[in-house]
Image (cartoon, rainbow, N blue to C red):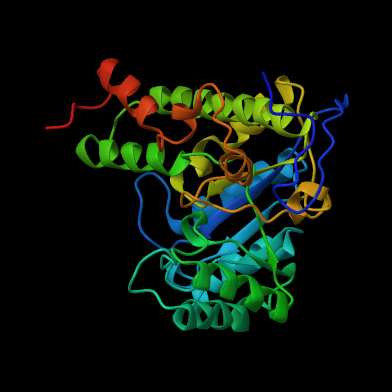
Amino acid sequence: MRPSCSFRVFGLALALTPAAMAQTVAFTFDDGPKLEATPRLNPAQRNAALLAALKQHQVQATLFVTLGNGADRPEGLALARAWGEAGHLIGNHTVTHLDLDAAATTLASYEGEIQACDQVIRTLPGYRPWFRFTFLREGNTPEKRDGLRTFLQATGYRNAYVSLDTSDWRLDEAMRKQLARHPDADLAPFRTAYLAHLRQRSEAYRDLSRKLFGRDIPQVMLLHHNLINALFLGDALQQFKAMGWTFVSPETAFQDFIYTLTPQRPAPGQSLLLSAARSLGYRPEGWERLVDDGEADIQALVKQGVLPAAP
């Protein structure tokens, strides 16, 4: 059962008239480019692998730059520039990935990080005045939330919402820890878990969009500039093709009406669709899997004996 046929929660009436359309998805990558060392691939190799997979499948993506992860140094800035030169888009993800929901984070300090990041990335090809909230959290007080919205509007920045949130970072973290313990570890179970996780999240968020809006929306997916994507992004893109999904640019996806909404967020973080559901007091079936930060996937790997049980 879906919610009632029209909503005014966002100050707009949303008529839920089912519409048949092909499911589309836009790919975005946060926190890059990273210069940290990882097993198997060095920073330049990770960057090149991501770009190669996107090129092979003719996907235009967006890299949301966290300046302090590497783009504040010449070698890291070169990796970010490679995205723009390859035809991808560049957005803003602060300098240090601080948390606007943290009591110690002031509105002024957060705005300052956006401005500092902007000064660097606006020189890159593919730059867009798009901002992706760190942790997808928009502030722990109404003053922070409304103040940042005012700031973004005044500076011409778009809130680069996520509709299809994933916990790829959790699987990446677990995989890197496993490689630290066992450098020659077989990564096939992590590939399988990664692909299954993306499929589960994609199908769940597609179902949620249909329940909330009566149609498929162009999904904006959140992934990260990390090792697991460098290794298996090509497989993920092939999986989406096999599912019948087609790829669109983030610029095209953001033209959809739903990305103009500003739901009230009683819980921090998470996707635009979950925020909309929370604003409506609607709790979809399978909610727990969407908010568990990949815990179910990690526990499945523990049960398989791939990962050690937590002490």
Residue drawn at point x = 34 percent, y = 70 percent = 103
- Report whether 190 appears left or right of 231: left
In front here: 143 or 207?
143
Position of the N terminus by quadrant: top right
Kindly indicate the quadrant of the structure image that contains residue 152.
bottom right
**Direction from residue 283 to residue 300 in the image, left or right:** left
The residue at the far left in this view is 311
x 80%, y 55%: residue: 251
Numbered marks: total: 0
- Does the image show residue 85? yes
Question: Visible in this render: residue 33?
Answer: no
Q: Position of residue 302 (x, y in %)?
A: 26, 22
**Which image quadrant is residue 133 in?**
bottom right
Percent position (x, y) of residue 109?
45, 81
Q: Tell me what residue is drawn at x 41 percent, y 33 percent.
A: 294
Left or right position of 146 against 187: right
What residue is at 59 percent from the left and 61 percent from the top?
A: 132
In the rendered view of the protein, which quadrant contains the C terminus? top left
Percent coordinates x, y for residue 182 in the rendering: 23, 34
Where is residue 278 drawn, in percent x and y?
A: 56, 41
In this picture, residue 70 sits left or right of residue 14: left
